[in-house]
Image (cartoon, rainbow, N blue to C red):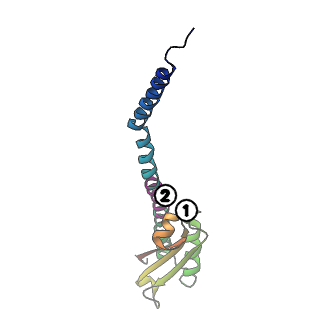
Amino acid sequence: MRKKHPQKAQHLLKQERVAKLKDFIKSEDGQAVVEFAIIAPILLLILCAIIDFGWIFSAQIATNNCAREGARFASTSTDYANASYNTSLKVKSVANDLIKQNLSTEVRFTNTQAPRNGDVTVNVTSEVKTLTIVANTVFGGSTMNLTSSVTMKVG
């Protein structure tokens, strides 16, 4: 028996392949991959920024709380000779683990002769390490110094 038009079968097969290739090219599956490749780094940067700024904001709130608690403690204390040392201990006792390691406290009375008749100012400075490279790039380093100052009336 004789084969029926082998060239025609090959031509149809070739046309079928070309049609599939055209369908694949017209398909939008590749477009979604390209769009994701463009957007993914931007989304990752935004996510890292949210994490870092939340971390730094939390540390700033903790620093503010320490300064407020230190000022409250110093304003009610009657041991003015050791007020700076005792206030530093109190500030470290209320600090959370995020800022406790690198914490410094400064206590100043406005009226050094009669502290009971003046104000007390407590300055708390903490050093916080950033978590991602986004904050390192924005703030120019892997650590940030956060400062809080609170003044209260003594007595």
Residue 44, position in %: x, y?
A: 47, 54
Residue 129: percent from left, percent from top: 56, 68
Residue 105 image-quadrant placement: bottom right
The residue at the far bottom in this view is 113
Segment colored magenta: 42-56
Q: Residue 3 got which mark?
A: none
- The answer to whether residue 51 is magenta is yes
Residue placed most toward the observer, 99 or 151: 99
- Assess disc 2: are there few (<14), some (14-19) or many (≥20) residues with their C-alpha within 10 Å of its C-alpha: some
| Residue 136 highlighted magenta (yes or no) | no
Residue 9, placed above or below residue 36: above
Reading the image, the residue beneath label 2 is 48
Residue 149 percent location from the top left of the image? 44, 76
Q: Tell me, yes or no, whether the two marked residues, 1 and 2, touch with CB atoms within 8 Å.
A: yes
Mark positioned earlier in the residue sequence (1 or 2): 2
Q: Is residue 23 above or below residue 109?
A: above
